Every structure is written in structure tokens, then in C-alpha cells.
Image (cartoon, rainbow, N blue to C red):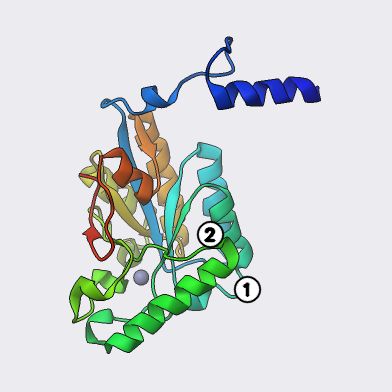
Amino acid sequence: MKKKALAFALCVLLLTGCSGPAVETDGTAMLSEEVKYVALTFDDGPHEDTTAALLDGLKERGAAATFFLIGTEIAGKEDLVARMGAEGHQVGNHTWSHLRLETAPPETVVYEIQRTDEAIGAILGGSGYWLRTPYGLLPQSGETLLSVPLVKWSVDPRDWESRNKEKIVSAVMADIRPGSIILLHDIYQPSVEAALEIVDRLQAKGYWFVTVEELLRLYGIAPQPGVMYRSGK
Ligand SMILES: [Zn+2]
């Protein structure tokens, strides 16, 4: 059995010289222009009551997402952050204390971003995690202070306001298009339920759910530090 498994793994890796049903597609097929990509993003977590169920649902559906974490929310929930990394999601920085950057002094802005970057790096390794600023606001000094790509959004169902699954789903379905970046918050149960229904409905329409980093790359964008991206198109 072990030898068989190894041979299968090698086939998948090489994608050549193998036949049979094991390998259904190759890399070039996934890059077809007919394929539609979108990115789900979740701010303000991780949350002990809701994030695990979201990760379970995304895993069942083979959907990747991007999580912008508040630094103060990480302690005690390191396992959730580790899961995000292990399960193919992108993890990003949403400042240490959800600070309004446009009124903060530059040294505070740098501190809020660096401390969160270090907290994520302590779990997942590395540094330079992409940033979503709270409320999408920029510091007074503009983007020049920031050394990583910034991510905004193009579809905002205002889930924090309605806290209503059906409203969130229909708002997203009304605005969605290939390249969209969808803003949600995994700290609310209706948002998590809406997110999974959105995945089901859009996958049925031929959409693929990828991380923001993958989305930009798939649409030919080379992300630059200090530049804010709102969608893949
Ligand atoms: Zn936020």
C-alpha cells in the first residue's frame, strides 16, 4: 500500500507519464480565461466561537480565504491561526488594536503593524504579512509608511450592520463579478453561515475561491508594497 501511495504522489507531482483517473486536470487548465476567481476576506478575528466552523466549512468545499487578524485577538487562539496557515488560507494583519490609522502618529502606526506582524510570524513563521487597515483608512502620511501590499475590497455587504444571513448573501450575489474581493467578518455567526452559502452558490456558477495573493497573481497583478488593492481587476 505504501508503495502505491508513493507512486500516486509522484504522479501528482510530475503530472507527466501517468495515466488513469487520478490526475483530473493540470495547471494550464486552471488558468483558462473562462474560469472565474474571487477572494473571500474575513476581518477582526480569530474568534473562539465562530472561526473554527468557518474553517471546517471552507475545507469541506475546497475554498481558500484570507483572514486579516487583530493582534489582540490572537493570544489563546494560536491553534486557529495555525489551521489557517496549514489549510492554505492567507493570513494578514489588521493592526494590533483595530486602530484608526488616519489620526494616529506615525510611530503608533508602525508599532501597531509590527507587533501584529510579529504575533502572526511567531505562529506561522516569516514576516511581511499583508495589511488591511481598519475601516480601509490610511495614515496621514499615506501609503509611503507601509512596507507591504494593502488590501481593500470591492464587495461590502455590511455584514456587521445587518447580522442577517439572507441579507448578506443577496448583497454579495448582487455585486459579485470575477476578480471581486468580498469583505466579511468571521466574528459573527450569520456572516459565517452566509459565507458558506456564498461559496456553494458561486461554486455552482463556476467561481473558484482563492486567497487575495493568488487572486492578484491570477489576474496578472504583481503586488507592490504600499499599494492598496481593491479587486483583481
Ligand atoms: Zn476591522
Viewer-nearest of labels 2 and 1?
1
Q: Quadrant of ligand 1?
A: bottom left
Residue 187 or 31: which is nearer the viewer? 31
Residue 93 in the image: x percent, y percent? 41, 68
Residue at 26% x, 42% y: name it.
179
Indicate the position of residue 30 as horizontal and vertical percent values.
Answer: 38, 27
Q: Which residue is mark 2?
A: 51
The answer to whether 25 is drawn above or below residue 196 in the figure is: above
* Image quadrant in which the N terminus is located: top right
Number of other residues with Cα within 10 Å of mark 1, as a class: few under 14, some 14 to 19, many 20 or more: few
Q: Label 2 CB, ligand 1: below 8 Å?
A: no
The CA span between labels 2 and 1 is 13 Å
State left or right for residue 197 relative to residue 105. right
Q: Quadrant location of residue 103?
A: bottom left
Which residue corresponds to the image point at 59% horizontal and 55% vertical from the top-left? 83
The amino acid marked with disc number 2 is Thr
**Residue 132 bears which disc, if any?**
none
Q: Secondary structure at mark 2?
A: helix
Residue lying at 46% horizontally and 20% vertically, measured from the top left: 25
